[in-house]
Image (cartoon, rainbow, N blue to C red):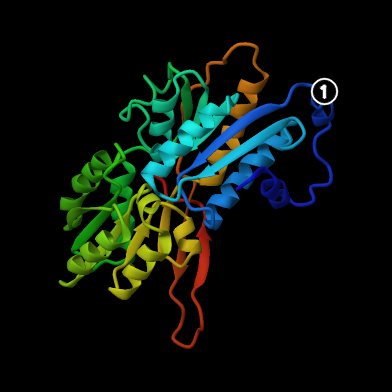
Amino acid sequence: MRRREFITLLGSAAAWPVAARAQQRERMRRIGVLIPFATDDPAAHRRVLAFAQALAQSGWIDGRNILIDIRWGAGDPERIRRYAAELVALAPDVILTVTSTTTGPLLQATRSVPIVFVQVAEPVGAGFVETLARPGGNATGFMLYEYGIGGKWLELLKEIAPGVKRVAFLQNPTIAAGPGQFGAIQGAASSLGVEVRPINVRDAGEVERAITAFARPSNGGLIVAGGAPVAVPRDVIIKLAARHRLPALYSDHAFVTDGGLIAYGPDRPDQFRRAADYVDRILKAKSRPICRCRRRPITSWQSISRPPRHSASPRRRRCSPAPTR
């Protein structure tokens, strides 16, 4: 998405903060954004819009006192590495990265440009930061969830589909958090009478073959981890689950928006808004501020309730209060 298109996306915001007018006289600042998803991903666009709107609330307006350079990786590791180098070459003041898939290549490309990441499941284990309290280096940001959420995913799947005896866990093998999440699921599996197995997701063909083979015996279910849709589009996974009649639980609410059964996880747009606060601190600081990595609590779960047979479409519902651990 180019800057002109991004300004159009924001629409006719009539009253931006007064602080923006004072900042117009300052030098133009530059923000890079590296996103692993495709340019036509509506959920990713909504999250980037939330980031831009939060920046605007702090007085940073694209085209007035900041330039926002966005690159879309479309799940292609080579393209992501190329865009990482391209963004660093633009000498931005700060770069926003989304998921481990883009944060890793960016840190390989620079150890000096400040990086704020969102939707990263295990920043310490991945080597992005030293500790959550004292990140060190040039990166900080927002942890997506802790390993223990894997047990909650399995519990919820059993609640909605008590007959499930086998569960496939779709994970992106390039993401460090996968084994820890799978371990948490395994820890809960015996008490729930479920057998679990991991399925690595690298491309659509691989996941189709794996799910088709898994679905041949009965009583199967599906859990889709956060990194899976980076490698395979959401609609591909949703259609495979429906075709093979596999009850599926997703870690991202965007799956439910696109027709998936149930999701349990954090509010991802909220992470983008909070990332804008970190970016604001970096842009306004005379020296680099110390911004701790933050855990974001599980805020809500969302599902599609099954319609009556005469109903033409399912009914979406966002459940509140959220289940708690």
Q: Residue furthest top?
A: 287
Q: Secondary structure at mark 1?
A: loop
Residue 70: x and y, percent? Answer: 57, 41
Query: In which quarter of the view is residue 124 placed?
Result: top left
**Residue 188 visible, this angle:** yes
- The kind of residue on which mark 1 rests is Arg
Instruction: State the residue at coordinates (37%, 43%).
Output: 77
Q: Is residue 215 left or right of residue 25?
A: left
Query: In which quarter of the view is residue 50 placed?
Result: top right
Instruction: State the residue at coordinates (25%, 54%).
Output: 169
Q: Is residue 34 left or right of residue 146?
A: right
Q: Is residue 206 left or right of residue 252?
A: left
**Residue 144 visible, this angle:** no
Residue 85 vs 152, above or below: the answer is above
Estimate how packed mark 1 is, as few (under 14), some (14 to 19) or many (20 or more) residues with alpha carbons within 10 Å. few
Residue 290: x and y, percent? Answer: 53, 16
Name the quadrant of the C terminus.
Answer: top left
Residue 225: x and y, percent? Answer: 34, 50
Residue 256: x and y, percent? Answer: 46, 62
**Residue to which mark 1 is pinned:** 25
Residue 314 vs 39, above or below: the answer is below
